[in-house]
Amino acid sequence: MTEKELIALARSAALKAYAPYSGFSVGCAIESVDGEIVTGANMENACYRLGLCAEQSALTTAQHAFGLARVARIAVAGGDGSGEELQGEQSVTPCGGCRQAILEASHLSGRDIEIYAASGDGSVHETLRIRSLIPHGFGPENLKDADR
Ligand code: THU
């Protein structure tokens, strides 16, 4: 699958977001090392701060479908999802919490997961790597000195 195809899946997934509070629909498509695909979208609720991001929604499905350790590439796109196609010109990079969740998958496999951060209309995207998005991140190896 090309970058553009994975981004197109993220854009379609965003149309299934439940984002009545922010009005900002985000979609995420994840490809496994074997080419399997899962998608997710953000899901908000009346207690604003408890909403779920698209990336974490898709990562949960990825864990069920093929396991976090097999995550290879992730596309994210966000914008106005009120019409038939996702709109918006600014690329969306994963928020801090989502970076932490992607880092966990990266630690499981030792793979520096590739991330395509795309605009809602898909016209622009940046190609990023999780280890550069969260430098000096806190990962499983930082728990070595735990009392157990
Ligand atoms: N959002 C995501 O789904 N992923 C991100 O990485 C950034 C933010 C969602 C959360 C909220 O529902 C909406 O976008 C506005 O912040």
Image (tube, helix red, strand yellow):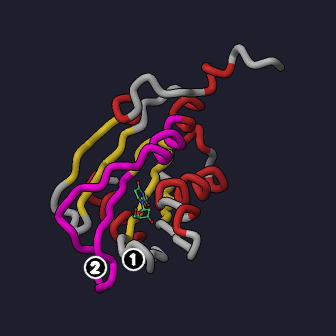
Residue at x-position 58% and y-position 70% = 47
Residue appearing at x 41%, y 32% in the figure? 134
Expressed as whole percent of the image width and height from the top left, the position of residue 148 reads 83, 20
Expressed as whole percent of the image width and height from the top left, the position of residue 22 reads: 39, 72
Residue that extends furthest to the top in the rendered view of this protein: 145
Quarter of image, res 84:
bottom left
N-terminal label among 2 and 1: 1
Residue 35 on the magenta segment = no
Which percent across, then down, holds residue 123? 16, 62
Mark 2–mark 1 contact, CB under 8 Å? yes
Q: Quadrant of residue 101?
A: top right
Q: Is residue 33 visible?
A: no
Is residue 84 highlighted in magenta? yes
The residue beneath circle 2 is: 85
Image height of 43 relative to 129, above or below = below
Q: Secondary structure at mark 1?
A: loop
Going by the numbered disc 1, the residue's amino acid type is Leu
Label of residue 142 in the image: none
> Residue placed farthest to the bottom in the image?
83
Q: Depth check: 62 or 134 in front?
A: 134
Describe residue 125's horizontal placement relative to residue 101 as left or right. Answer: left
Q: Amino acid at mark 2?
A: Glu
Residue at image point 71% right, 14% down? 145
Disc 2/disc 1 C-alpha distance (Å):
7 Å
Number of marks: 2
Query: Alpha-carbon neighbours of circle 2 within 10 Å: few (<14), some, or many (≥20)?
Result: some
The percent position of residue 122, horizontal first and vertical second, equals 22, 63
Magenta segment: 75-103
Q: Which residue is mark 1?
A: 15
